[in-house]
Amino acid sequence: MQRVSVRDDHELETGDEYALSAAADRTRFTLHNKADGMIAELRDDDAARFLKDYDEMKIQFPDWNADKLLAQLWDQGGYGWLAQQEE
């Protein structure tokens, strides 16, 4: 998997266990499971699907904090399967 500098990413959500950042144009997302030291870098079709899922969950569950929302996407959304150990 190609590594991209996250310097240009903007943090969208952050909690004690998870963090989410995105490229300014939202064509790339980085979902970080801090507890497990895993990172899912989402691009292309994965990024488009993630954005749709993320936006839908934000609407459905507006009171969820970052950890709850991102944990749901990681586990139930299946994005954890795309993760690699962080370097």
Image (spheres, rainbow, N blue to C red):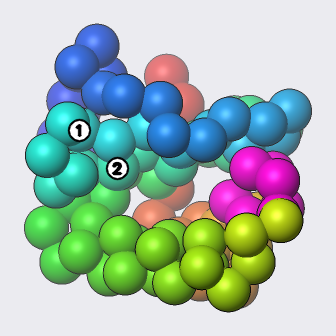
Counting from the top left corner in percent of width and height, residue 39 is at 52, 43
Q: What residue is shown at x 46% (from left), y 74% (from top)?
A: 55
Camera-side residue of 72 and 55? 55
Image-based side of 22 in relation to 25, left or right: right
Q: Which residues are magenta?
A: 64-70
Res. 84 visible in picture: no
- SS type, badge 2: strand
The CA span between labels 2 and 1 is 7 Å
Near mark 2 (Cα within 10 A), the count class, few <14, some 14-19 or many ≥20, is: many
- Amino acid identity at mark 1: Ala
Q: Are marks 2 and 1 in contact (CB under 8 Å)?
A: yes
Camera-side residue of 65 and 45? 65
**What residue did someone put label 1 on?**
23
**What residue did someone put label 2 on?**
29
Q: What residue is shown at x 46% (from left), y 52% (from top)?
A: 40
Magenta span contains residue 65: yes
- Residue 60 lies in quadrant: bottom right
Disc number for residue 31: none
- Residue 21 lies in quadrant: top left
Image-based side of 66 in relation to 58, left or right: right
The extreme top residue here reads 7
Counting from the top left corner in percent of width and height, residue 54 is at 50, 71
Counting from the top left corner in percent of width and height, residue 83 is at 51, 56
Is 12 above or below relative to 66?
Answer: above
